[in-house]
Amino acid sequence: MALMPLTDAMFLVPETREQPMHVGGLQLFDLPPGAGKGYLRELYERAVSVEDVAPVFRKRPHRSPLTLGQWTWQQDDEIDLEHHVRHSALPEPGRVRELFALTSRLHGTLLDRKRPLWESHLIEGLEGDRFAVYTKMHHAVMDGISAMRTLTTSLSTDPDARDVAVPWQASEQPRRRRGVGRSPLALPGLAAQLGLDAVTLLPTLVKLANDGLTSQATVLPLQAPRSMLNVAITGSRRFAAESWSLARIKAVARGADATVNDVVLAMCSGALRAYLLELDALPEAPLVAMTPVSLRKGQTDEQSGNAVGVILCNLATDVQHPGARLVAIRSSMLSGKRALQGLSQNQVSALSLVAVAPLLLNSVMALHKVSPPPFNLVISNVPGSPDPLYWNGARMTGAYPLSIPLDGQALNITLASYDGQVHVGIVGCRRSVPRLQRLLVHLEESLAALEDVVL
């Protein structure tokens, strides 16, 4: 029996009722021309009738004395699709407001560990001849890159296609199998390899520590200031989302000789600064964001599991000028990327674990009450399809990601690019982050301020 990779198991261990560890996505679709009232019901019935379910959607966690108490993955051979796929309807008047309220509730509930760790909700009743699909999957099963790739490959670029493919349907094309675990008997060899990786990682850790003491660009764990975002959370969530033109963001990136990711981080930085100023809660020291980076290195056959590292980014929220904030963010991200260059995936995972280890202990020790946060929030940027996608003739018009607020990390901002737009999904603890929707207004103001300075 194969042991679960550490990069998967680390998302199961800290899960509590207050801290569900699943990621999600909300997609909006325009009904195709001529669609009748039973269109979504037909889609649902065909979606739950799939017989050949892909292996990744059959995975459920398991541990026992035979696994030495360690987590493994098992395949569920009796999967109940009617449990995992739900058909819902919005109350009138079916505005986006009602959709976000429903999505907030769905995102705050735990997945059943006795079953494969995912759900998909087909939601009708949205105004403007539209419907929505909300899907969530445990982060132990799939990271953001994998989730976006799975969604993209299940949809079609052909508006006339009517094959009703769904993400949980097994592909007709065989995929090269990726090693997803190790036998307990392989633990001594694995420990030796990890030990060697750790030894060769020591010079990098020493250099990072030295850079952190001498350069503002390099950020180390526990350098983030205390803030209203770094408090205990409840299991209740609030979700807000909006879209921005990718062309606007790329124009700022070209004008500032920065990356698109640098610019979206600067957008978030300006929005957070304005939001916290409104609440009289802006720390004197700059906020620090944990920014996941993909370790897949161009591989296209990996549809599951986790392959991410992290960079800690100085958001320069103590700087008033938007252009100066962007320069500081770009410098910080370059410093973090240089630290990861030349490292193996195991080494990057170990280095990333150093950054997030305090969060993993929060569930049992509540470290956020006695120590500075390792960072103030997570900001992720996930690439998606540049072309419009269709599901049974319905055009997808929005693809909004939802991620994980953590105990001591009450806010998460995730961005996903699709069809010339950047779709931003913000998830916060309902009790700890008031007036969450104000961040959307401040994001637009922040981008406009960058355009005024750079263009």
Image (cartoon, rainbow, N blue to C red):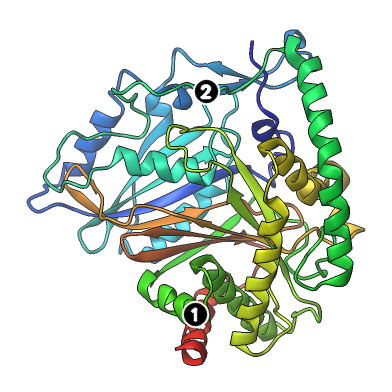
Please state the horizontal and vertical placement of residue 169, each as a whole percent of the image: 33, 27
Name the residue carrying label 2: 59
Using the numbered discs, state the Cα–Cα distance from disc 2 to disc 1 in whole angstroms: 40 Å
Q: Earlier in the sequence, mark 2 or mark 1?
A: 2
Can the viewer see residue 327 in this picture? yes
Can the viewer see residue 359 in this picture? no
- Numbered label attached to residue 9: none
What kind of element bears circle 1? Answer: helix
How crowded pointer 1 is (Cα within 10 Å; few <14, some 14-19, many 20+) is rated as: few
The extreme left residue here reads: 34
Q: Is residue 57 left or right of residue 319?
A: left
* Quarter holding residue 442: bottom right
Q: Amino acid at mark 2?
A: Lys
Please state the horizontal and vertical placement of residue 425, each as a whole percent of the image: 49, 61
Does residue 84 lie above or below 201 as drawn? Answer: above
Count of marks overlaid on the render? 2
Q: Amino acid at mark 1?
A: Val
Does residue 87 lie above or below 4 as drawn? Answer: below
Name the residue carrying label 1: 441
